Image (cartoon, grey):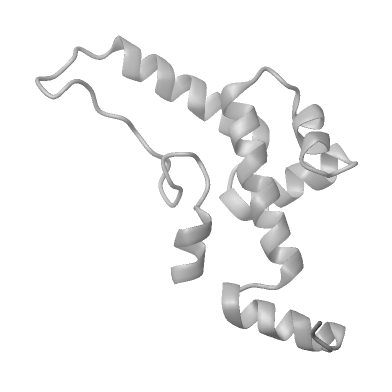
Amino acid sequence: MVHLSTKQVARVFTDAYGKTPLAYLTMLRVEEMARLLRETDLTIEQAGRKVGWQSRNRASEAFRQATGLTPSRYRIMLATQYRRHHDQPRGIAGSTTACVPGLSHSGVETVQNRRSS
């Protein structure tokens, strides 16, 4: 058993992961919410609740702060990219995929990317 104060635990966590425990939890929630928005037909409110936010407004604000896009805009962007991707002729290597500037292919930065920055 380790005997550390709450502040000491937060400091050790921040040193190890590069963000506070709450910021890390928020990042994980945003990543999962992005996946739910990509892979399901859940509403934004339902996706937000599934990842732990009780308020659609809080979920939307955290998502926007982390990605630069509102969840609605994120879904619209994905639909647009999907249409462009499927409307383009295939190249020799198959096809190309578009990513949103500043975001990973999944739509949000990965845990590993965030740790290394």
> Farthest residue toward the front?
1
Total marks in image: 0
> Taking the image as drawn, is residue 80 in sight?
yes
In the rendered view, does 95 fall on the left or right side of 54? left
* Residue 11 image offset from top left, x and y in percent: 71, 85
Q: Quadrant of the N terminus?
A: bottom right
* Residue 12 image offset from top left, x and y in percent: 68, 84
Residue 23 position (above or below residue 28): below
Residue 1 position (above or below residue 74): below
In the rendered view, does 110 fall on the left or right side of 92? right
> Taking the image as drawn, is residue 117 in sight?
no
In the rendered view, does 46 fall on the left or right side of 41? right
* Residue 48 image offset from top left, x and y in percent: 78, 37
* Quadrant of the rendered image containing residue 85: top left
Q: Quadrant of the C terminus?
A: bottom left
Residue 96 position (above or below residue 6): above
Q: Which residue is found at the position 58% from the left and 23% from the top? A: 39
Q: Which is nearer the eye, 32 or 2?
A: 2
* Quadrant of the rendered image containing residue 31: top right
Q: Which residue is found at the position 79% from the left and 85% from the top? A: 2
Q: Which residue is found at the position 13% from the left and 24% from the top? A: 93
Q: Which residue is found at the position 64% from the left and 20% from the top? A: 40
